[in-house]
Image: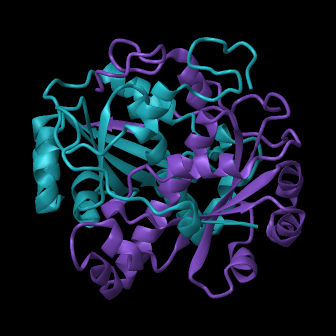
Chain colours: A cyan, B purple
Amino acid sequence: MHANLTTPSDTVDGTLDDAAIARLFTEARTHAAFDPRPLPVELLRRLYALASLGPTSMNCQPARFVFVASEAGRERLLPHVAAGNQPKVRSAPVTVIVARDTRFYEHMPTLWHVPDAGANFERQPAHAQATAQRNATLTGAYLLMAARALGLACGPMSGFDAEGVNRSFFPDGRWEADFLINLGYPAGPAQRPRAPRLGFQQACVLA
Amino acid sequence: MHANLTTPSDTVDGTLDDAAIARLFTEARTHAAFDPRPLPVELLRRLYALASLGPTSMNCQPARFVFVASEAGRERLLPHVAAGNQPKVRSAPVTVIVARDTRFYEHMPTLWHVPDAGANFERQPAHAQATAQRNATLTGAYLLMAARALGLACGPMSGFDAEGVNRSFFPDGRWEADFLINLGYPAGPAQRPRAPRLGFQQACVLA
C-alpha cells in the first residue's frame, strides 16, 4: 500500500502484526473501571486529530465531541446517565459525548470541492439529518478505534437520556447527542468474559 | 494494558507504532480504483471476525454484510448506485452492503446475559430501530478499520438508492441497507489530495 512503510508492524502484505490487531480487536474489550490518572488535553487533541481523518460522506464531518473531564462536567452529565452506567462515568477520567452538528453543512464550502454541496443539504432536511446521524456515528467508531490505538480503554454506552443531555449541554439545539464513550487507562482486565459473536454464516452473505 | 503484548508495534505506553497508525489513520485514504485481484473468502471471514469484535450496545450486533463479489451480484447492485460511484464499484473486487437486521433482537437470548432483553426491544420499536441503526453503522466503521488493518483499501459510499438495494437484495424487508464500502487492494495511491479536516476548536469542547 505504501512502499515506505517498512517498520516492524507491517508484514509483507500490509497486514498489521498480531500485537496491533490484538490491541484494536482481538484483545480489546469494553471497560467499566478506569485508572484515575487524568488524560492530558494534548492526548485528547491527538485522539481527535486521528479520528477526524476517518472518511465521511463528502467529507462532511458532522461529528462533534464533548470531552467531559471536570468534576463540574461530570456532575452535569450524571443525572442523564442510566443508573447502571453511573459508576462507570464516575470511574472514567473522561466521558466523551459523541454528538452531531445538525447544521454541519455550513462548513461544506471549506470541506468539499463541489460548490453548492452545503446548499443541497440545506434544501433536503431529511437527507441532512440522515447524513449527520450516520457520519457522526461512524466518526464515533473511528474515535473509539483511535483511542485503542493510543493505548486507551473505552466503554461506549447508549444507556442515557439523550434529550436530557441535549438540554443541558446543547441548549441552542444545534448539536445532538448520539452516544457516550468512557475513556481512560484501564484499571485492569475487563471483568466479564467476552460475550459471543454471531458467526459469518449468521451475519454475512456472499453475492 | 496487556503486559504480554511486547512485540514491536507496542511502545512502552501501549500506543501503536507510527506505521500502524499511518496504515489506519494518517496515511489511510478513501480509494476509488482497485487492483483487480479478487479477495479470497477466507480474507472476508477474517475481516468479519475482527469487525464483529467491536462493541455494540448490549452486544446486540445488528450489522449484516453482503459481500458483492460476483459479476451477477455487481450487475444487480450497479443500477442502484449513483452514476459517479459506478466506476468505483466496477473497479472494486468486492463491494460490501453494510446493512442492519431490523429483527436483530431475536438473537439476544444467545448474545446477552439479561433475560428479556430481546422482548424489551420488541416492545419498543422506535428504540429497536435506533439501536439497529446506530450499532450497524458503528460496526460498518469497525469493518472499515479492520479492512485497513488487513492491508486492504476502502471506498465507503452513501451515494446510492437504499430503497432500490433493499428491494433487490432484501425483498422480505428484514435487512435494510445503511451504506456501501468498496474493498480491495489499492491500484495505487489515492488520486486527490486529502481534503481538510475541522480543527479541535471547531469540533470539540472540554467540559
Q: Position of residue B21 (x, y in %)?
A: 53, 24
Q: Is residue B128 visible?
A: yes
Q: Nearer the viewer, residue B66 or B23?
A: B66
Name the residue rendered at 40%, 80% in the picture. Answer: B106
Name the residue rendered at 61%, 27% in the picture. Answer: B23
Q: Quadrant of the N terminus of chain B?
A: top left
Q: Is residue B199 visible?
A: no
Q: Is A19 placed above or below A120 here?
A: above
Name the residue rendered at 31%, 40% in the picture. Answer: A154
Q: Quadrant of residue B205?
A: top left
Q: Position of residue B100 (x, y in %)?
A: 54, 70
Q: Quadrant of residue A11?
A: top right
Q: Is A109 placed above or below B180 here?
A: above
Q: Quadrant of the C terminus of chain B?
A: top left
Report the side of A118 relative to B174 (left or right): right
Residue lying farthest front?
B42
